[in-house]
Amino acid sequence: MVYLESFKLLDELDEHNSLINEMQIYNGNYYPYGLFSYKEFRTIDFDDITIFYGGNGSGKTTLLNIVSEKINANRNNKSYKGMLFKKYADSCECKFERKYLCDEIKLISSDDVFDYLLDVRAINTGVNRRKADLAHGYLEDAYGSEETSRFQEYNNLKRKVETKRMSKSQFIRHNLVNNNIQEQSNGETALNFWQTEIKENALYILDEPENSLSAENQLKLKQFIEESVRFYKCQFIISTHSPFLLSLYGAKIYDLDENPVKVKKWNELKNVKVYYDFFKDNKDVFEIRRNNEI
């Protein structure tokens, strides 16, 4: 489902007219002015999945932030980039289609994933500490002195009887009011974050969502994004250099390493070719291992 149909960046003339009264104020630091105009990158036509690809410094994250600023996307981590950045974004143009059907517009960065992982880790620390306390209490109640029990109140005696009927594991889980123990790896937890965060009928802007994900989980995320487009009417704008996400079905890919910027197929991109050449050069290693396994 396409909600954001197109976006227009500033060309050199637009930038000059926008900055003509600002040049003395900013002393030559005009970021993000000049970042895309010299690449002749003006109009972005969006599809169900649109990807900005490029190496470090290519501007793909900056581009996501410009689009997000212009369309007023929600985000968990607010970051003020200055009046000049806002001035640039405000000077851009965008065109929506069926915006009334879009329930949410949100930018999700890799920082959001890391924050989620830290939150889960903090929860686990607290739960595990409570778990240790309960384990100690279980041993006291299950194997403590019966004579001591005679002097306890009825509720304490009842608790001891109930404790003896349970294993230690059952006792701990029964008494953990909020059982938030996560027995997943960071990658699995990160994948769970995406599956929890993405809702129906929404436009999501994702900044390198492959971070913290293994190759296997990147493929799972790829499938999840494709299914969210197909069945849940979502639109995605993504910055990535992951070969797995670059192969998202039907994705339109803008190669920001090119000057001028070009739309390419995923198997035409330099980063993907590097992976291909590496595995091609080591083809014999995989064949030897396969033969040994047979």
Image (cartoon, rainbow, N blue to C red):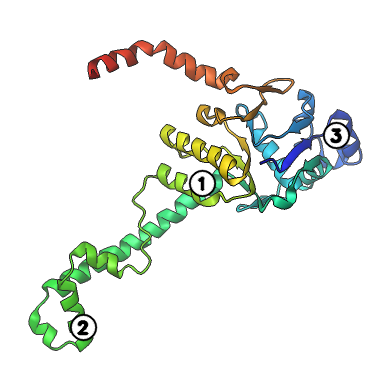
Q: Quadrant of residue 165?
A: bottom left
Tell me the residue that label 3 is attached to: 15
- Indicate which label's residue lies in the foreground, 3 or 2: 2
Above or below, comparing residue 261 to residue 220 in the picture: above
Q: Determine whether 74 is above or below 274 in the image.
A: below
Horizontal and vertical percent for residue 175?
Answer: 29, 70
Counting residues from the start of the chain, the first of labels 3 and 2 encountered is 3
- The reply, left or right, for residue 122 in relation to residue 132 is right
Q: Of 125 and 206, which appears nearest the observer?
A: 206
Q: Earlier in the sequence, mark 2 or mark 1?
A: 2
How far, Cα to Cα, is label 3 from label 2?
A: 76 Å
Report the mark closest to the observer, 3 or 1: 1
Which amino acid type is marked by label 2? Asn
Q: CA distance from mark 2 to mark 1?
A: 45 Å
Q: Quadrant of the N terminus?
A: top right
- Is residue 31 in sight in this rendering? no
